[in-house]
Amino acid sequence: MASLNSLLSSMLLVLAIVASLASPSFSTSRRAHESKEAKQIGFRVTLKHVDHGKNFTKFERLQRAMKRGRSRLQKLNAMVLAAGDSTELASPVHAGNGEFLMQLSLGTPPDSFSAIVDTGSDLIWTQCKPCTQCFDQSTPIFDPKKSSTFSKLACSSQLCETLPASSCGSDGCEYLYTYGDYSSTQGILASETFTFADSVSVPKVGFGCGEDNEGSGFDQGAGLVGLGRGPLSLVSQLGVPKFSYCLTSIDDTKTSKLLMGTEATSGNLSTKALKTTPLIKNPSQPSFYYLSLEGISVGDTLLPIKKSTFALQSDGSGGVIIDSGTTITYIEESAYDLVKKEFKSQVKLTLDDSGSTGLDLCFKLPSDASQVEVPKLIFHFEGADLDLPGENYMIADSTVGLVCLAMGSSSGMSIFGNVQQQNMMVIHDLKKETLSFLPVECDKL
């Protein structure tokens, strides 16, 4: 049983983070994805939440995050269904959006901008002049004419051939990316020098130079940095064997981190508590990081969830992905119903059915909330039993007198969300094709 005494003042779903960049290990001037020394690249950047600095109440932040998460879940499921439809001829729809922003620079001399970090997609892109249609952004729109290292990619280039939707125009390789909320980016595929953490410069990184960008899906930043498993993503182009991120608990004064390459597992970290599980590939959705979830325990009860519930189906549907861009965890409906039923049985508090939080299962807090106990929640991944701390699945707010389960139901794909990942280093080993969880205080990295 885990006490909620320390959770009440700060356990709302607010992952607002102060943006600043930490020091890199060193810089490189060679094309990372072609160099035998690519594995020596290492840097870390600070992430901030998309709602950082905005004048929202705690509940407004929670509701905004949940709305984005539910929308993202619907998009991801739609992507999988479309991929399995052999009659689908339209340009594929991508999930887009995300919950965190990173700062980086583009061009020579470098122009700084912030972009959404998305582990569920691949393409790196930003808005470029001349814009036929561009959304408002806080930094100047990138002007390729002012950079000495900008180069358009030919239609015969390898990266152009990997685009899901491209055409050959007078400017070379042209792309179109459409997202589930009707946002889109269209422009030319180019290469440019990217600079991370102010001094780690990598030339000839392929990216989308968007000249027609529509919709409101990306107005938190100036584009997107894909961290998926496909060839267009940042991690693939850098050629690094590992990357990780570490998301802080909900405290405005703490910072989250993205760690790349040699920095991915750096620091004096004890690996005794390391939990490692295989990464699974889905041929119909090769960009996603799929995990094998074998069961869930609530307290001492291993729930009677059918073995096939979380399985990846032959048509590419189902399965479980880990995603930094979805706020709470969504699991297949039949499994969620069992989780919900068991929490109702084990939590000795009065149910709240007001629906004011947007979360499905809430309880009323007694006047002496320090004595409240909640059952353990364990996710049984293949080779890794992940015993979550209470603040990673119970959301408490003494001002409204409620404590809620930070989970929801899904029809189809299940998603292990970022609240469940907080204060853990989540290490993606791309060479070994494993994912590891290591409990740490993320703001002290």
Image (cartoon, rainbow, N blue to C red):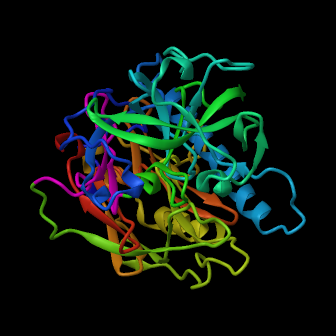
Tell me residue 311's x, y (percent). 60, 79
In-front residue for pair 388/396: 388
Which residue sits furthest bottom?
307
Quarter that holds the N terminus: bottom left
Q: In which quarter of the image is residue 101?
A: top left
In the rendered image, the vertical position of residue 50 relative to residue 363, given as above or below: above
Q: Quadrant of residue 261?
A: bottom left
The overriding secondary structure of the stretch rendered in magenta is loop
Q: What stretch is highlighted in magenta?
A: 240-267
In-front residue for pair 202/20: 202
In-front residue for pair 155/46: 155
Q: Is residue 263 visible?
A: yes
In the rendered image, the vertical position of residue 349 relative to residue 219, given as above or below: below
Residue 145 colored magenta? Answer: no
In the visual, does 313 lie left or right of 113? right
Q: In which quarter of the image is residue 82?
A: bottom right
Q: Which residue is drawn at 47% across and 43% down?
A: 205
Quarter that holds the C terminus: top left
Q: Is residue 368 visible?
A: no
Tell me residue 253's x, y (percent). 26, 28
Tell me residue 190's x, y (percent). 58, 38
Residue 262 colored magenta? Answer: yes
